[in-house]
Amino acid sequence: MDLRKYKVPEIVYGDKSIELVAKYAKNYNAEKIMVVTDQGVIDAGWIKVIEDILNDNYLKYIIYKNVTPNPKDYEVNEGAQSYIQEKCNLLIAVGGGSVLDCAKGIGIVCTNKKDINEFEGVDNIRIPMPPLICVPTTAGSAADISQFAIILNTPKRKKIAIISKALVPDVSIIDGITTTTMSKELTANTGMDALVHSIEAYVSNASSLLTNIHALEAINLINNNLINAVNEPYNMMARNNMMMGCTLAGIAFSNASLGIVHAMAHSLGGLKDLPHGECNAILLEHCIDFNFESCPDKYKDVYIAMGGDPSMESSEVKKHLTEKINQLSNSIGIADSFEHYHIQHHELEEIAINAYNDPCIVTNPRNAEVEDIKMIFEKLIK
Ligand SMILES: [Fe+2]
């Protein structure tokens, strides 16, 4: 049997689970809390909800809100400085993947007293972070589950992947209501990110039974609920199913890792500061086209999980699976190329090299060289 490891946080989910945030903070002996968030989450009203709960429980807190999409190294370092100055002893992160990743970064910088960019790579965290409670407000990143944090190294204009079990939060409080305030565009982009997590985890060469069952159910849930979640923001069945799909995908990819789609999305998104989910969604069908022959049976399982015909010959599956993904993407308003971002041909070399060096590419089922990656990008910049 292949050697594998598996780690998940304590997961609390369901209606009104957000109200348990103070109980969990007390369980971890909170004396002063840093709530990490961003302006979008504040504007959506979720920080007011959290503040009311903390105030009702006489818990002291400060708010760090200077997080932007594709969280930057200086935001992490600034948050960590403030955490230390204010003598906080617990983190609550309320937001999407950027906020959750920034909070993880703040946690490890505080305890290890090193610049965030020094943690790049796998297993480079020596001292655990303070207790971290996550309240995700998007159904996409699953950073509340995963052992990943993606931070933008601004001097190098490159996203770094920090991967360690030390980044798995202590508690993830998952309440679908927090996703009802997402815009259509954010719902679409984050939902496609979750779909890519589940597919890449399933075909990863580090997958196992423990991750596969979660990945396949995630594909099924996301495929059946994403369009409704985009079109009907207050459809709680769709929102809850997307949250569950995203969580299952998180359990899968946190333990099986990802692949070429994420390696390329990190590289491109880092250099041009682009939305992560959209990058993944645009890349997905082209990366399946590249990977398919390395594991056709696995892609057939993905196709079946998306409602495809189980009796179809594997040789036919590639065409039908990529069509299905393309249809889903188009129906929720995602572009089919990067044309609108005006990426220049001369930028491709650097983007391809950074993707080639991204840790996510290690578990891709097919070996990809810099030239292969460049070829995929070339099809998409037009
Ligand atoms: Fe992702």
Image (cartoon, rainbow, N blue to C red):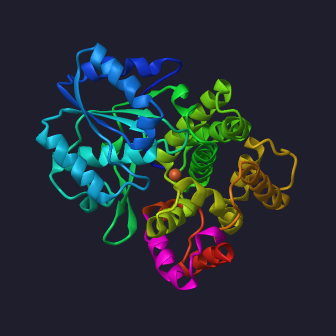
In this rendering, position of residue 212 left or right of residue 96? right
Magenta highlight on residue 111 = no
Q: 343 or 369: which is nearer to us?
A: 343
The quadrant of the rendering that contains the C terminus is: bottom right
Residue displayed at 39% across by 52% down? 68
Q: 63 or 311: which is nearer to us?
A: 63
Going by the picture, which residue comes out furthest to the front? 43
Residue displayed at 52% across by 56% down? 276
In this rendering, position of residue 352 left or right of residue 150? right
Q: Is residue 20 above or below residue 112?
A: above
Q: 235 or 246: which is nearer to us?
A: 235
In this rendering, position of residue 101 left or right of residue 360? left
Our reading of the magenta stretch's main secondary structure is helix
Residue 106 pos. (x, y %): 26, 46
Q: Is residue 57 above or below residue 76?
A: above
In this rendering, position of residue 101 left or right of residue 382? left
Residue bounds of the magenta highlight: 339-358
Residue displayed at 56% across by 70% down? 367
Residue 147 can be seen in this image: no
Q: 66 or 307: which is nearer to us?
A: 66
Residue 25 pos. (x, y %): 28, 23
Count how many numbered circles sit on residues in the image: 0
Residue 96 pos. (x, y %): 46, 42
Residue displayed at 49% across by 17% down? 16
Going by the picture, which residue comes out furthest to the bottom? 346
Q: Is residue 7 above or below residue 241?
A: below
Residue 240 pos. (x, y %): 60, 28
Magenta highlight on residue 348 = yes
Residue 97 can be seen in this image: yes
